[in-house]
Image (cartoon, coloured by chain):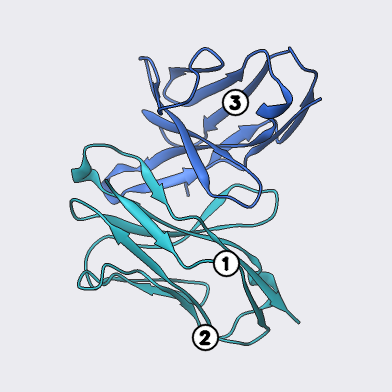
Amino acid sequence: GDSVTQMEGPVTLSEEAFLTINCTYTATGYPSLFWYVQYPGEGLQLLLKATKADDKGSNKGFEATYRKETTSFHLEKGSVQVSDSAVYFCALSDPLGGNNRLAFGKGNQVVVIP
Amino acid sequence: GAVVSQHPSRVICKSGTSVKIECRSLDFQATTMFWYRQFPKQSLMLMATSNEGSKATYEQGVEKDKFLINHASLTLSTLTVTSAHPEDSSFYICSARSDPSNYGYTFGSGTRLTVV
């Protein structure tokens, strides 16, 4: 079945550092890929998405490129701020898989230290 | 943009009582809504898919008699936790397909349920 794998463990880094969170996926069809962000005590907010191979999603300085050849959708930001501290979830939706649901990765806690 | 309103944001109830959580799509019609449960520092676990006008589809291991889902209109789905116990304490989040043509999903802000 469809699945999403995120790198293990929390990520702690200093303000203005470069952030990368790895995400790989397994899908039967041609999924759409998403990154969601969750701030403490809140629901999920869509950060960015890509619906086909080689698409680049971007928002608020974050970017991720849909790489079909490596089945990856890594999230990057060149210079993080303290306000970027949150949990980040990679997700996919595979309409050809026969349902409408999102499959989530386990999430990565990002802590940005001033 | 699409907004999903979820209420209440926090609720504390006594063991054995029932709690209803509402999820409304404010500016779009949602034929399908999803209910998730999230444990501390963990990912979202899909509990059920709620379809307007029909019975919900529950994921394996989710007790349908305990977690009652009603989706009576295109803008409202409710999750009722019946005979709540402390182990039901969790963060519950709803989601709706806001843009089927572009696979857009919008999430509610979540409900923190504490059963004492």
Query: Mark 1 and 3 residues: CB-CB less than 8 Å, in contact?
Result: no
Query: Mark 3 and 2 residues: CB-CB less than 8 Å, in contact?
Result: no
Reply above or below: B40 against B72. Answer: below
Disc sitting over residue B52 in the figure: none
Query: Mark 1 and 2 residues: CB-CB less than 8 Å, in contact?
Result: no
Reply above or below: B76 against A54. Answer: above
Disc sitting over residue A9 in the figure: 1
Which sits earlier in the primary sequence, circle 1 or circle 2?
Answer: 1
Q: Dividing the image into 4 quarters, which one contains the C terminus of chain B? A: top right
Disc sitting over residue B22 in the figure: 3
Under mark 2, the amino acid is Gly
| The quadrant where residue A102 appears | top left
Q: Residue at x 50, y 24 (%)?
A: B76
> Can residue B70 be seen here?
yes
Residue in front for this viewpoint, B30 or B86: B86
| The quadrant where residue B78 appears | top right
Structural distance between the alpha carbons of marks 1 and 3: 33 Å
Q: Residue at x 71, y 21 (%)?
A: B85
Disc 2: which chain?
A
Structural distance between the alpha carbons of marks 1 and 2: 20 Å
- SS at mark 1 in the image: loop
Identify the residue position indicated by label 2 in the image.
A78
Structural distance between the alpha carbons of marks 3 and 2: 39 Å
- SS at mark 3 in the image: strand
Disc 3: which chain?
B
Residue B14 at x, y percent in the picture: 80, 18
Residue A73 at x, y percent in the picture: 35, 69
Residue B8 at x, y percent in the picture: 70, 30
Same chain for labels 1 and 3? Say yes or no: no
Chain A, colour shown: cyan
Q: Residues within 10 Å of mark 2 (few under 14, many from 20)?
A: few
Residue B71 at x, y percent in the picture: 45, 19
